[in-house]
Amino acid sequence: MSPHIALLRAVNVGGRKVLKDDLLGLARDLGFESAKTLLASGNLVLWGEAGGDLEGRLEEGLEKRMGLRTDFMVRTPAELRAVIAANPFRDQAATRPNHLLVSFLKTPIDSDTVEVLRAAITGREEIHADGRALYIDFKDGIGESTLDRDWKKTKREPLGTTRNWNTVLKLAEMVAA
């Protein structure tokens, strides 16, 4: 059975609560009897045959189950391993993994959007785009950064959901077994 990593966007913040039992119920609704969650931030690992448009089925299923519309970003173990291998911030991953984030994007980010994002940086953050992954090194910590707020003001796509490096590695462990 093939695992799939399903990452929810914008849940368990701002009153958009999705509990572990909700995610596991959603997985069962879609025929995935084997599923696990990681942390309380919208990480779901499914084992089984995905069929077509798993992201869309998850989004519709969550809306039907809970009345909540949000995006899912689904990755295979191979895609997650490729994100880890392509990390341009290896030293940061080793020394301060909680300041290194990866945005898993719905669609690949184009170079114009990357430049708009770079222009929104007012601190010492660094970014690197690679297909449907955007790596962000928050050198001075996430709490001190205005990048997220300033990025939202640009109203640029693509949509994504962000995880810190520790979570990325834990997800990779879950699907490696």
Image (tube, rainbow, N blue to C red):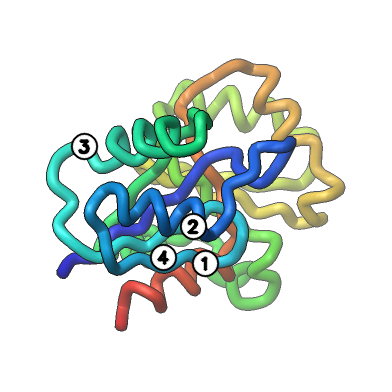
Specify whether residue 101 is in view: no
Q: Earlier in the sequence, mark 3 or mark 4?
A: 3
Q: Could you tell me residue 26's position as x and y percent?
A: 38, 49
Residue at 80 percent of width and 43 percent of height: 145
At label 4, which amino acid type do we have?
Ile
Q: Residue furthest bottom?
A: 177
On the rendered structure, is 121 left or right of 10? right
At label 3, which amino acid type do we have?
Asp
Query: Which residue in the protein does label 4 denote?
Result: 84
Do callouts 1 and 2 mark residues in contact (Cβ within 8 Å)? yes
Q: Earlier in the sequence, mark 2 or mark 3?
A: 2
Q: Judging from the image, what secondary structure is the residue with disc 3 in?
A: loop
Of the 4 image quadrants, the one containing the C terminus is bottom left
Residue at 46 percent of width and 61 percent of height: 87
Q: Quadrant of residue 83?
A: bottom left
Q: Residues within 10 Å of mark 4 (few under 14, many from 20)?
A: some
Q: Could you tell me residue 138's position as x and y percent?
A: 71, 53
For this rendering, which residue is in front, 140 or 152?
152
How far apart marks 1 and 4 lie (CA) works out to 18 Å
Query: Which residue in the protein does label 1 denote?
Result: 38
On the rendered structure, is 72 left or right of 143? left
Nearer to us of marks 1 and 4 is 1
Q: Could you tell me residue 34's position as x and y percent?
A: 29, 68
At label 1, which amino acid type do we have?
Leu
For this rendering, which residue is in front, 102 or 49?
49
Q: Earlier in the sequence, mark 3 or mark 1?
A: 1
Query: Which numbered circle lies on residue 53?
Result: 3
How far apart marks 3 and 1 lie (CA) works out to 23 Å
